[in-house]
Image (cartoon, rainbow, N blue to C red):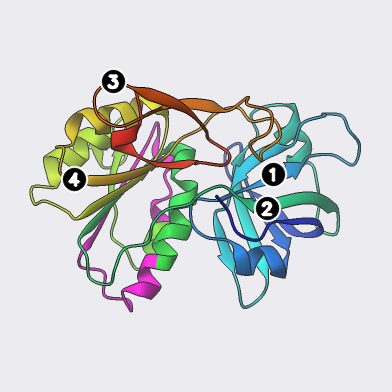
Amino acid sequence: MWGQVYNKNTAIIKNDEVMPGHWLLCLDSPDIARAASPGQFLHVRCSRTLDPLLRRPLSIYCADRERGRVYILYRAAGRGTALLAGMRPGDRLDVMGPLGKGYTLPSPGRSVAVIGGGIGAAPLFFLLSEIKAIYSGRLENVAVFLGAATGELLLASQTAALGFSPYTATDDGTVGFKGSVIDLYIDTNGSKVDRIYACGPPPMLKSLSRALGPDIRAEVSVEERMGCGVGACLSCVCKVREGAGEEFRYAHVCKDGPVFSIQDLFF
């Protein structure tokens, strides 16, 4: 469950198309920036009216706490995000957050792997920023794996700007390894890591679940359609394990997640 949640009428600082069909939105919101943690999301009303009615859950790409700014990297994939892509600096958005349960940050120096697929890698940028600070810039124990359909959709340059040297995979082989990012991780990561962090499409997470041994701790961010964003409407439930065996319960992705232990999920 989250801590302090704000409902703010925030000013747009910038909203630029940074990749084909993908926008980077910067919001002026000091309270949300201070409260946010990697893996959480914002619930954004994409217009000044109630049409469309539902907010859109958008992962936090990063938070600049000193300047009080929050960034969201999103894909214009439907009516709501298309309206959002048309907004300009100076426009205002009704934003609620930060919401959800984020990633558990590692202790300094622990060996970790961070795996992202497509636009699903967006919240991992925030995570990597926090890991860099925790590790005091000593990043030799952090391996980053990024996959996408094509090279232009990778977040490799953004990750490299933080000081990481990501391994890359593309479906078409135009950049890095040709194939899935999970195959790349299996081929590259011969040594055991203490923890894995991942975010990406369900097939990627399913492949990761099958590839991992039972003793490797992994946290993954999952996606479900959301209504209220606060656990009241039950539209984003998913099955999670309850004890040993195949017993399960239903969890709210918006409230109990979106980050879960991969061992608790059913694929």
Placement of 238 over or under 231, stated as above or below: above
Disc 1 marks which residue?
43
From mark 2 to mark 1, how far is it between C-alphas?
A: 6 Å
Q: Which of marks 3 and 1 is nearer the N terminus?
A: 1
The percent position of residue 232, horizontal first and vertical second, equals 68, 33
From mark 3 to mark 4, how far is it between C-alphas?
A: 20 Å
Disc 4 marks which residue?
216
Q: What residue type is labelled 4?
A: Ile
The residue carrying pointer 3 sits among few (fewer than 14), some (14 to 19) or many (20 or more) residues within 10 Å by Cα, namely few
In the image, which residues are magenta? 131-158
The residue at 58%/61% (across/down) is 36
Where, by quadrant of the figure, is residue 246 drawn?
top left
Where, quadrant-wise, is the C terminus in this rendering?
top left
Q: What residue type is labelled 1?
A: His
The residue carrying pointer 2 sits among few (fewer than 14), some (14 to 19) or many (20 or more) residues within 10 Å by Cα, namely many
Q: Residue 97 carries which label?
A: 2
Where, by quadrant of the figure, is residue 152 drawn?
top left
The residue at 78%/39% (across/down) is 46
Q: Which amino acid does label 3 sit on?
A: Glu
The percent position of residue 251, horizontal first and vertical second, equals 50, 32
Query: As drawn, which residue projects farthest toward the right?
Result: 49
Disc 3 marks which residue?
246
For residue 77, side relative to residue 150 (left or right): right
Helix, strand or loop at disc 3? loop
From mark 3 to mark 1, how far is it between C-alphas?
A: 33 Å
The percent position of residue 25, horizontal first and vertical second, equals 67, 53
- Answer whether residue 136 is magenta in the image: yes
Q: Which of marks 4 and 1 is nearer the N terminus?
A: 1
Placement of 69 over or under 261, stated as above or below: below
Q: Earlier in the sequence, mark 2 or mark 1?
A: 1
Q: Which-is-in-front pick, marks 3 and 4? A: 3
Helix, strand or loop at disc 2? strand
